[in-house]
Image: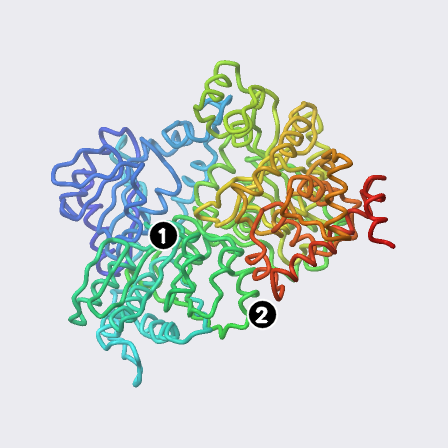
Amino acid sequence: MFEGAIRAVHEEACRANERRLLVVTGPRARGITVAKTVCSVAEPETVVTVGSIDLPDVRSVPHSDTDSLLGTTQDCLLVDCHESSQPNTLGGTIGAVDGGGLVVWLTPTLSRWPERRDEFDATLAVPPATIDDVTGAFRTRLGSLLELHDGIAILDVSTETVLRDGLTDPPPSTARPQPQPPQSHDFPAAAYESCLTTDQARTLFALERLQTPGTATVLESDRGRGKSSVAGLAAGSLAVEGARVLITAPATSNVRALFKRASELVADCGVRQTATEISVETTTGGTVKYVSPTDGIDQIESADACIVDEAAALPVGTLEQFCTETPVAFATTVHGYEGTGRGFAVRFQDRLTESNLDVTHRTMQTPIRYADDDPIEKFAFHALLLDATPPVEPLIEDVTPDECVYERLTTAELIDDDHRLRSLFGLLVLAHYRTEPDDLARLLDAPNLDVRVLTADGHVVAVALLAREGAIGEQRRRATYRGERLRGNMIPDLLTSQLRDPDGATPVGYRVMRIATHPAIQSRGIGSKLLTKLHAEFDEAGWFGVSFGATPELLRFWTANGYKMVHLSTTRNDTSGEHSAVMLRPGASALFEKHTRWFEERIGGMCCDTLSAVSPDLLRGVYAATERPIERSLSDREWQLITSCAYGPGQFDMQPRPFRRLVERALSDPECTSLTPDQERLLVSRVLQAISWEVVATKLGYHSASGCRRALGRALRVLVDRYGTEAAATERRWYDE
């Protein structure tokens, strides 16, 4: 059945070096029969199935393991969409197929597909919602686009009808000329001979800058341009010459292709090596080693070169810490099938330009695995909004908060207005370090999400996603308290399981899951206006909350909008490289009052233990984000000790506890404005974090430990003068004579 149609579309794909999408719609059993025909046309050994379809001589990958396909190249991928229609999987499988290959989706009848519920839908049903509450809007939109884009064949197995043949009659592909290496180059000739396009050869030449300290090379490309391959050629070239190359990325799965290429080049150069999936060690003394972003920050100074792959998926604050004298390359996917993030392009490149590094930019545009006009790439970009962008700057650059209109956008409105959906999603991509196709489905289908925007002249200029959390029944709350995870309820789960509050999941609250303002109009109060409107609309909520990778800037923003600290993680997130902060805003429940008080009670003990390595600027922001000044009573004897250290020969080291109490009070008191930022950093580092005099002096730029001690005394004088009791005044008089 359908053999002629399948063979025709496959032959055209091969002739044009393009991909084709084959949608087999209808009952699953009949679809599997057609899948067998696909195997006979494409040859079973070239087919990989995603799902539990059992076909003779065909390799099968479960839906849960589709990340293993990223960075691989396949001739034919067959996805069982009856089991799951996860957007990340749909996009990832498209990205793994070569020119001349087929992507095959087995789907329910297209008209009924939005009504079906599958494994991915179950992940969107956040308790207390059930899978029946999930909508099918994402698949409604997807189905309509299948009928609009070229290169998509649709076979209806119920009626045995070819609804679309997928044929476009493209011109035959022509072989690309072999790229010529530059006349003079440092990397081995074998590296340039491995390049498949002129784009790759020119990029490899640019990466020779990895031999020059104080340089940064920015490499951008869409998926399928050979970015990881050329980065691997550069790393292998350096290792052949004995260099130590550090590779970092959000996950090891991001760099498998890079290490494979590096190892192959080392072998091509005739150098012996010991290699794994994430390391290469040569007999010349060179190494190519993967480390997590957090470990990479610690190790970059000891490396000869560093490559940060998938840099767009890392926060700007993490990327900045790789800007050292060690030569570095930042490689990133602009529009990736598995998700993208534009913080790199929008914010980090500006900071690179302002740095002392010699920066070069290189963009790769030529696909290496399929033709330039591949229709399935265009479909994937449109269907998954991989290239979504916000309104262009000239349309909104003069907007003020007073001009902005607050709007509630329903799923139906977003489906009917693709332009507005693209603008909204484009803002989210700009704002968050990793926005995935799955996020599009959550936006359209998840029953616990609400979308609110600010518009100006019809253009979306700010967007917020709200996640309803809480209202959990007693049985599940008890299970969460005992350690079971409360899926999809980030803040109630934290309050209950980690912070040990049996009532943490009882009231309904709203977590600000994402918020974004157009970069052209940031710092004008527009984001704050959006939050104000949200708070007013949902004023009966038990709480408002937010979780984010903590930076001083973000802490100031959320504090200014009425949110206060209830949690700071004790370790840095491996991907973001930052400590996660959770903040709450008062609501109808007692959670805010309880948890802000609990945080104030424990933060001091954490500073000199689990938070001893945290940036003093971050802790300054954390203390400023407490609900109230942290009152710690001090006895007359303790005021005597503090005052003698400030004005006389007393020693902080003899009894640090009262000093810590006083510093906590000052840093959490918004009316204490006499301390300079440098004095606050000193008080945090030495008094709260208990870092040694010598280390503090080095970190903060004092000439010696004794100079650091004298500076601490001057800072303590400010606090004694502001908070000191009669006991402090009595002690001070000893030194005023």
Q: Is residue 234 left or right of residue 138?
A: left
Whether residue 405 is visible? no
Q: Residue furthest bottom?
A: 183
Q: Which of the pair 249/607 is nearer the observer? A: 607
Lower position in the chain sequence, tag 2 or tag 1: 1
- Kind of residue indicated by mark 1: Asp
Q: Please name whichever residue, 115 or 497, is drawn nearer the observer in this view of the structure.
A: 497
- SS class, disc 2: helix
> Image quadrant of residue 714?
bottom right
Label 2, label 1: how far apart the Cα atoms are: 44 Å
- Kindly identify which numbered label has been placed on residue 354: 2
Mark 2 neighbour density, 10 Å: few (under 14) some (14–19) many (20 or more)? few
Is 19 placed above or below 264 here? Answer: above
Please identify the quadrant where the N terminus is shown: top left
Residue identifier under label 1: 150
Q: Where is 419 relative to 135, above or below?
A: below
Q: Residue at x 22, y 65 (%)?
A: 282
Q: Nearer the viewer, mark 2 or mark 1?
A: 2
